[in-house]
Each structure stands twice: as structure tokens, then as C-alpha cells.
């Protein structure tokens, strides 16, 4: 067990607050560490450190900045096994998923090391002779990066790497339920100048409202995002919000059902269903619905739920007791609303474990408008909807207040393109669910967020353009005062 310190001005120092909170293994309930619940003084220190370091960091040449970002990525890879193990212990994520995640984190820093060297602004055609017009893109200043528990390192990297590449400095607030792996990640930030990245735990509301924080980059629920946007709006503070989703997954009649079944199970049950882009609405065209459902039940029954540290575990626990209780309540309400329970549906504890486990659950005959189509279920619950044909499936998929992601399975190119055009979603997957690309934007439409992460768009989220207009011949303009010298035709 460890009692964690916070990272301020390049040094790991004790928090000055008296409050703290415990971090426990969600599979075994073992106490893993204690983290400070930072108050105003600690938040002020962290923000001041970031502000002090920001201008010097911004002015570091792009080549040197890229070298430093690559060094962060290199240190992450070097310490990857240790970081992945701790993340699995504190998150309940199967160890193989945690190892994959570390690879993605390192790759994110490496990507932005490269893209930041060649992305600074644009030249613009002038409107008159001997003039030059161009844009430069400047950092906002101090960024508050706030992430949830489900991907505590990856979602942090998606903010830290582009924010640094753009010339910002940061105050990072890891999730309250599992911050320990972010402290290990913080050791890799020691490659950077002091104060460029600072880490605090707790104090999220204080950080959001801090007058010297220029931009808030947040991933979490839509309700929390709305509260952050309201606070930011009072100060005209910029936000980048990646919020909730109830993503559709359509299986069309021509799909290879064996492939689609495995894809749907993985897209919904990855990380015990605790994924913002997981496929929470599986929409089946009627002609294949019965057979798909039969094969899905068979496949899900083969998945092993248990200790995340075992190599043969497919699904680990939910993050907390509250999370498990909420999923149980949501499943119960869904059944009352008419859904048919085919598999699972309750909490349980694998032999030798006493954590927050929930059975992989399949609900069939789910009605559009019932809870699984309007409320995000953050757990291993597969909700099956049936559409009479492809056209109705597309309409059902788009019938949502959200628009984070969408996935379809088909080999019909015309059908795929029609679905892509008609379904609002920040990411649209065809035959390959949940795959991300560092060079492509990630984010949501509608109530699923504001702004984008990853890609050039993710870099632009952390900088704003300045237009530079230059006339390299200094002379008076004929349209200046006095107007009596101008020859103007009368109307």
C-alpha cells in the first residue's frame, strides 16, 4: 500500500490538505493505496506551477519539443509492464487489456511528437499587392485534464500529448476510484521541464472553476459535462468535452454471423462494458435476429469472468459497489419494461473473490424508448433490438439524443454508405468496432460532447488561430481619411 504525493513544479510533494481517500482492488477489495483529496491550496499551487512554466514551454522549438514527447513515450514503454499491472489491479481490467492500453498511450505521445513538428499554421492568399497573410496557432495556456475510471491512462494521454504539443501546460486530475497508475505515468513526465505537467487528486470542482485555468479537457458523463460547461460559460472558459453515448451496432442480413457475434460481444463486453463507445444497442434485422441471438448466447457463455490478473480471464469486475448496484437496478427496470432476460442479470462473486462482479447479461426483445435506449448502462449488459428491415434499423440507430459512435456489419457498400450518412456519430465503424486511430478525430455529436480528441483536430482543440496581416511596403492607403480625396461615384 502506498500513500501518494502530488506532482507540482516537477517535484513529488505531500499535499497540504488533511483529507484523503482509499483506493481498493475492485476484484478482491484489497487496499492498494491512499491518495490526498486536494483542497484549494493544493489546486492553487498546481495551477500556479503550470502557469509559471507555460510561456517557456511554448517557446521551446518544435524539434526539441518533439524529442521530449518521444522521450515520454519511450519511458512509458520501458515501464509498461509495471504500469499495466497496477492499472489492472486498481481498475479490474483484464491484464491483457491493460497491456494493450499502455501500447496505445505510448503511441499517442509518439504521434503528437511527429505531428507537432509540421503543424503550426497556414498561409492565406493576400487581397492586395505586396501583402502577406498567414495564421499561427497558439496555445490556450493552462489546461485542466480530468478523466474517468474506465481508461484512466489512455484518456489522459489523449489530452496531455496534444496539449503539450500545442504549447500548453497542464494540471491533471486522475479518477478518484483508480488514480495510482496515473502516478506511475507521472514518473514518465519527469522527462519534461518542471511545472509542464502537474498531478493532483480530488479537487475537481475547484480545478474547473479556477480563474487561471484556460481550458478544461474532460471525459465523463453527459450530466457532469453539462455542469462543467455551465461553470466554464460563466468565465468564457474553453472546453473540450467527450461525454456519454448509447451507441448502436447494426447487424444487417448479409453479415457473416459468426464474425458479427464475436464483434458484438467484444464491442459490448470489453472492460466489463465500462466503455463510452461500447455498443449498447445491438439492432438486428429480423431475418437474422433469431439465429444471431442463439449464437450470441452460446458465445457469451464461453467467456470467463474472474480475476483480472489471470491470463484466461475475459471479463473482470465493475469498478465499485455503486456501479454494480446501478447496473443491477437498470437491468431490473429493463425487464419490467418488457425486455426478456436470456442470460445473467445479477451480481455474483467468483470463487475466492469478493469484488464487484456482474454476470454477462443478454436482454432480448428490448423496446425502442425503454431504458437501454435512453440511459447509458455502464456494465456487461447486451441489449438486443429487432428491426423489420435495413431501413428501420438505420432509423432506430439514429433515434437517440447521443451521437458518440456507431457500428454496422455488412458487405453491401451502398447500404453501408447510406447508414453512414443517416446516422449521427462522431466515429462510424464498418465491420471493425471500437478501433481508434491516433491520426483520426475522436469525439461525439449531439449530447455526446463538444470538440474532438486525436488527429489534427485533437491538436487544434488545444490551440487557437491568430491571423497575421503584413504589408511589406509602408505607404498610405487611398481609402484612408480624408474622404474628400476619394473619387466615389454617387448613387
Image (spheres, rainbow, N blue to C red):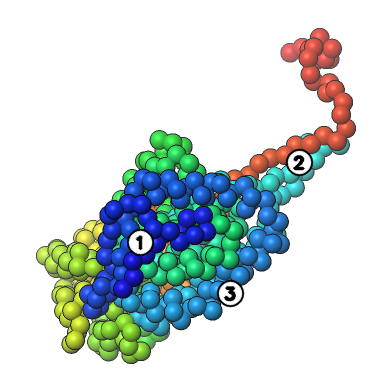
445 lies above or below 407: above
Residue 202 in percent (x, y) is at 34, 55
The answer to which of 424 and 181 lies nearer the viewer is 181
Label 2 crowd (10 A; few <14 / some 14-19 / many >=20): some
Q: CA distance from mark 1 to mark 3?
A: 24 Å
Residue 175 marker: 1
Sequence order check: which comes first, mark 2 or mark 3? 3
Provide the secondary structure element on which disc 3 rests. Answer: helix
Q: Position of residue 437 (x, y in %)?
A: 53, 69
Q: Residue at x 49, y 68 (%)?
A: 187
CA gap, disc 2 to disc 1? 44 Å
Q: Quadrant of residue 369?
A: bottom left
Query: What residue lies at 82% left-to-right and 15% top-to-bottom?
Result: 486
**Where does the N terminus fall, quadrant-wise?**
bottom left
Mark 1 or mark 3, which has the lower sequence index? 3
Residue hosting label 3: 74
- Rendered residue at 40%/35% (across/down): 234
In space, the residues marked 2 and 3 are separated at their CA atoms by 39 Å
Q: Is residue 482 visible?
A: yes
Q: Residues within 10 Å of mark 3 (few under 14, many from 20)?
A: some
Amino acid at each position: 500500500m502506498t500513500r501518494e504525493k502530488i506532482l507540482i513544479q516537477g517535484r513529488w510533494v505531500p499535499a497540504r490538505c488533511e483529507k484523503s481517500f482509499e483506493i481498493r482492488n475492485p476484484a478482491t477489495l484489497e487496499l492498494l493505496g491512499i491518495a490526498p483529496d486536494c483542497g484549494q491550496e493544493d489546486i492553487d499551487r498546481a495551477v500556479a506551477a503550470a502557469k509559471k512554466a507555460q510561456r517557456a514551454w511554448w517557446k521551446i522549438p518544435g524539434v526539441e519539443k518533439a524529442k521530449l514527447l518521444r522521450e515520454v513515450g519511450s519511458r512509458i514503454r520501458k515501464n509498461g509492464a509495471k504500469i499495466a499491472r497496477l492499472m489492472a489491479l486498481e481498475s479490474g481490467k483484464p491484464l491483457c487489456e491493460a497491456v494493450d492500453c499502455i501500447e496505445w498511450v505510448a503511441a499517442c505521445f509518439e504521434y503528437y511528437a511527429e505531428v507537432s513538428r509540421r503543424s503550426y499554421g497556414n498561409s492565406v492568399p493576400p487581397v492586395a499587392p505586396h501583402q502577406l497573410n498567414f495564421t499561427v496557432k497558439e496555445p490556450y495556456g493552462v489546461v485542466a485534464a480530468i478523466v474517468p475510471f474506465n481508461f484512466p491512462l489512455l484518456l489522459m494521454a489523449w489530452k496531455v500529448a496534444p496539449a503539450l504539443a500545442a504549447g500548453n501546460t497542464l494540471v491533471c486530475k486522475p479518477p478518484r476510484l483508480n488514480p495510482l497508475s496515473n502516478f506511475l505515468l507521472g514518473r514518465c513526465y519527469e522527462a519534461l521541464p518542471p511545472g509542464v505537467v502537474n498531478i493532483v487528486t480530488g479537487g475537481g470542482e475547484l480545478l474547473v472553476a479556477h480563474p487561471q485555468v484556460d481550458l478544461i479537457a474532460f471525459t465523463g458523463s453527459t450530466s457532469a459535462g453539462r455542469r462543467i460547461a455551465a461553470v466554464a460559460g460563466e468565465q468564457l472558459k474553453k472546453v473540450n468535452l467527450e461525454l456519454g453515448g448509447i451507441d448502436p451496432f447494426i447487424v444487417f442480413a448479409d453479415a457473416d454471423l459468426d464474425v458479427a457475434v464475436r464483434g458484438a460481444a467484444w464491442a459490448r463486453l470489453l472492460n466489463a462494458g465500462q466503455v463510452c463507445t461500447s455498443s449498447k444497442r445491438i439492432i438486428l434485422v429480423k431475418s437474422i435476429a433469431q439465429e444471431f441471438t442463439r449464437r450470441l448466447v452460446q458465445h457469451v457463455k464461453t467467456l470467463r469472468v474472474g480475476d483480472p490478473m489471470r491470463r484466461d480471464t475475459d471479463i473482470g469486475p465493475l469498478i465499485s459497489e455503486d456501479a454494480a448496484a446501478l447496473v443491477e437496478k437498470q437491468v431490473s427496470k429493463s425487464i419490467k419494461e418488457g425486455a426478456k432476460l436470456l442470460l445473467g442479470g445479477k451480481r455474483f462473486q467468483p470463487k475466492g473473490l469478493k469484488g464487484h462482479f456482474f454476470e454477462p447479461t443478454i436482454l432480448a426483445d428490448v423496446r425502442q424508448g425503454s431504458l437501454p435506449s435512453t440511459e447509458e448502462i455502464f456494465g456487461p449488459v447486451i441489449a438486443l433490438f429487432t428491426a423489420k428491415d435495413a431501413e428501420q434499423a438505420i432509423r432506430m440507430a439514429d433515434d437517440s439524443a447521443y451521437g458518440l459512435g456507431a457500428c454496422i456489419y455488412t458487405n453491401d457498400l451502398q447500404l453501408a454508405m447510406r447508414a453512414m450518412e443517416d446516422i449521427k456519430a462522431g466515429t462510424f465503424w464498418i465491420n471493425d468496432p471500437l478501433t481508434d486511430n491516433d491520426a483520426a478525430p475522436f469525439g461525439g455529436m449531439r449530447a455526446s460532447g463538444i470538440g474532438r480528441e486525436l488527429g489534427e483536430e485533437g491538436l487544434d482543440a488545444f490551440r487557437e488561430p491568430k491571423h497575421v496581416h503584413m504589408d511589406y511596403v509602408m505607404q498610405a492607403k487611398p481609402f484612408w481619411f480624408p474622404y474628400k480625396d476619394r473619387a466615389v461615384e454617387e448613387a
